[in-house]
Amino acid sequence: MGNICIFAGQGAQYPGMGRDLAGCDGAVAGLFEKAGSVLGYDIASLCFEGPAEALVKSDVCQPATFLVSYAAWTLFRKKAPAVAFDAAAGLSLGEWTALCAAGVLDFESTLQVLSARGRFMQEACEAQPSGMIAIVGASPEQLSAICEKSGCTVANVNSASQQVLSGSKDAVAAAAAAAKELGVKRAIPLATAGAFHSPFMAPAREKLAGVLESVKFSTPSIPVLSNVTGKPHPSDPGAIKASMLEQVTGTTNWAADVETAKAMGCTRFVEFGPGKTLSGLVKKIDASLETLNIQDVPGLEAAVAAMG
């Protein structure tokens, strides 16, 4: 049985996340303290206590979700050092966590990158009002028609039956109307700050490129799957950097990542970080795949018992 570690994306965060992980291990508690020093504010308190309104902001949410996911990863590696992972993946910001877990970036650099990435994306949202809408149960032809009628673009391919579109506020409303007209099962406007993974994020991509110029990338220790291509990142650090910039404005294809992982022989998907969103999507793609979730101590203990 092949194992793949997968990491949560934006939207999985909640007040209280990471508290018991930090409470059970001094080294993990130290990660939260170190993160506060790197970022210049008490991110541990925001993770442990909230408020939710602060955690939902991209410039806080992205480093906070990474921090909790990496804390869960660190604790599992400490408790079950013999367990091997054949690949790593993550959704959107979670792909950065996967790169960190595979040694492409160090902990501090990843925090700094995600703080900047979140800030730049938030700025892009505020500069040009936009939004996202989940389309459930559409055929490829229906999805294409919705995009054509509304002007929206595909932001996320979560599974064959669930995609997320991005566009202006008017385009999102038009997509909802087009979906209804075409008899699509469900079209659900999402409570996001704006149109992530779309051309609306071009200013964020440009600013992030400047930040990444001074960030050291290394060759991955295990294959890390790309949201953009659905294939493993190449070994060339420069190519990885270019792909992660493209991810800001391009479609994230989680369904392709899962299919690639299956083709590599991975049948157990271990999700690190808050929530169980990715585990749920994996099961929708293929119910025969095994999923484990490590977001707290009970989840950690269950995973160690199952794998250790």
Image (cartoon, rainbow, N blue to C red):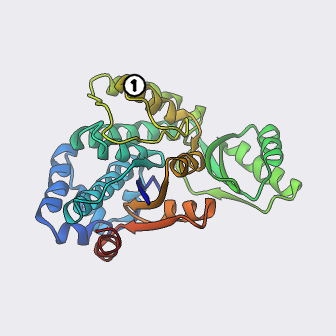
Left or right placement of residue 276 versus residue 216 in this view: right
Q: Is residue 290 left or right of residue 60?
A: right
In percent of the image, x 45 and y 61: which residue is there?
268
| Above or below, comparing residue 242 to residue 2 in the picture | above
* Residue position marked by numbered label 1 in the rendering: 209
Q: Secondary structure at mark 1?
A: helix
Q: Is residue 12 visible?
A: no
Question: How far from the left and from the top, in percent, is residue 59?
Answer: 37, 46
Above or below 238: residue 147 = below
The quadrant of the image that shows the C terminus is bottom left
In the displayed structure, would residue 300 be above or below residue 180?
A: below
Classify residue 144 by image quadrant: top right
| Depth order, front residue of 80/127 | 80
The residue lying furthest to the left in this view is: 26
Residue 175: horizontal and vertical position, in percent? 76, 48
User: Where does residue 99 sit, x and y in percent of width and height?
Assistant: 35, 41
Question: Does residue 74 show up?
Answer: yes
Q: Residue at x 78, y 41 (%)?
A: 150
Please name the residue shown 34% across and 75% down the image.
302
Instruction: Tell whether 189 sits left or right of 210.
Output: right
Query: Which quarter shows the N terminus?
Result: bottom left
Q: Quadrant of residue 47?
A: bottom left
Q: At 33% across and 57% down in the image, what residue appears? A: 69
Counting the numbered discs, the total is 1
Q: Amino acid at mark 1?
A: Ala
Judge the density around disc 1: few (<14), some (14-19), many (≥20) Cα neighbours within 10 Å: some
